[in-house]
Image (cartoon, helix red, strand yellow):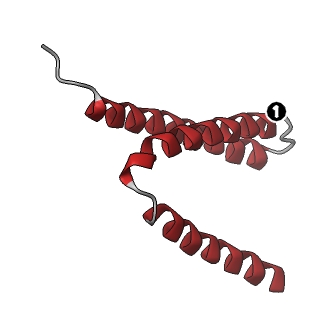
């Protein structure tokens, strides 16, 4: 039980620290940070695929497939947001 409380405490602290770090970033750095986040999400997607390959039970397979779907949505969404942000910096078309 104490392991669950410790892990939950770390999770809550990570949420607060992540929010504080991201809220302090200036708007000019958001595009490079999104590119880095997309690379991390790509690594997460590859990890989810590897976990799906090594799953032994149906529950592990279902959870890993859900992880693959969510990581894919996150990756594609990150690229869409990055593309929209880059469009804001382009000059007007003649």
Q: Position of residue 53 (x, y in %)?
A: 82, 33
Image-based side of 94 in relation to 10, left or right? left
Q: Position of residue 52 (x, y in %)?
A: 77, 37
Image-based side of 19 in relation to 44, left or right? left
Q: Nearer the viewer, residue 66 or 30?
A: 30
Q: Position of residue 87 (x, y in %)?
A: 29, 29
Q: Nearer the viewer, residue 59 or 36?
A: 36
Where residue 46 sits, quadrant-wise, is: top right
Residue in the picture at 75% in, 75% down = 7
Is any atom of residue 23 visible in this view? yes
Residue furthest bottom as drawn: 2
Quarter of the image that includes the C terminus = top left
What residue is disc 1 on? 53
Image height of 36 relative to 90, above or below? below
Image height of 12 relative to 90, above or below? below
Dot 1 lies on which element? helix
């Amino acid at each position: 039980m104490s392991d669950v409380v410790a892990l939950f405490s770390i999770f809550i602290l990570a949420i607060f620290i992540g929010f504080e770090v991201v809220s302090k970033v200036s708007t000019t750095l958001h595009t490079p940070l999104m590119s880095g986040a997309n690379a991390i999400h790509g690594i997460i997607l590859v990890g989810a695929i590897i976990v799906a390959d090594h799953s032994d039970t149906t529950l592990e397979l279902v959870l890993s497939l859900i992880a693959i779907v969510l990581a894919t949505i996150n990756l594609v969404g990150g690229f869409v947001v990055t593309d929209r942000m880059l469009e804001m910096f382009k000059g007007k078309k003649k």
